[in-house]
Image: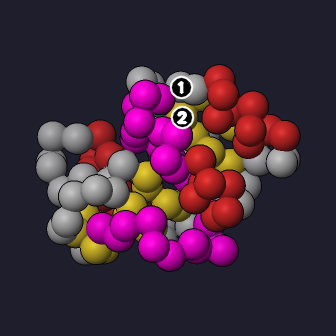
Amino acid sequence: MKKTLILGASPNPARYAYLVANKLVRKGYPIVNVGRKKGAVAGVDIEQMDVIHSDIDTITLYVGPQNQAPYYDYILQTNPKRVIFNPGAENEELKTKLQEVGIEAVEACTLVMLNTGQY
């Protein structure tokens, strides 16, 4: 199963990152939650960017482009196979950086991908 890092994880049930974390876990995907807020989502604690995970298949991004620059190195060091830019997170600068090192950059909605079997 594709281990997924949710960047921008939130313990707020009204946030899409929260919904995605729960849907991923219900479907059997292992997750890592990374965000600024303390707490847990889908039974998994929200971490800071202290630990670089080396076994991540997908990063699903829930951080607006205006706030993404501090995450660039973390994302690149994590070296996932792909990064999903959810609606509102699209960023051509980061997309280019990812593609330059062979990381697939996808502009899509993770919830839709999960619901339609495209994940």
Q: Is residue 54 visible from the viewing direction of this image?
A: yes
Q: Around disc 2, counting alpha carbons within 10 Å, would you say few (fewer than 14), some (14 to 19), or many (20 or more)?
A: many
Callout 1: SS: loop
Q: CA–CA distance between discs 1 and 2?
A: 5 Å
From the image, tell me which residue sits under label 2.
85
Residue 116 position within the rendered picture, expressed as x and y whole percent measured from the top left: 51, 37
> Does residue 77 show up magenta in the picture?
no
Which is more N-terminal, label 2 or label 1?
A: 2
Residue found 83% across the figure and 48% down from its top: 101
Report the disc number at residue 77: none
> Does residue 49 show up magenta in the picture?
yes
Q: Residue furthest front?
A: 70
Q: Around disc 1, counting alpha carbons within 10 Å, would you say few (fewer than 14), some (14 to 19), or many (20 or more)?
A: many
Type of amino acid under label 2: Phe
- Image position of 104 (left or right of 14): right
Residue found 54% across the figure and 34% down from its top: 85
Q: Is residue 109 visible from the viewing direction of this image?
A: no
Query: Which range is magenta?
Result: 46-71
Its colouring scheme is secondary structure
Residue 86 position within the rendered picture, expressed as x and y whole percent measured from the top left: 47, 33
Quarter of the image holding residue 6? bottom left
From the image, tell me which residue sits under label 1.
90
Dot 1 and dot 2 residues touching (CB under 8 Å)? yes
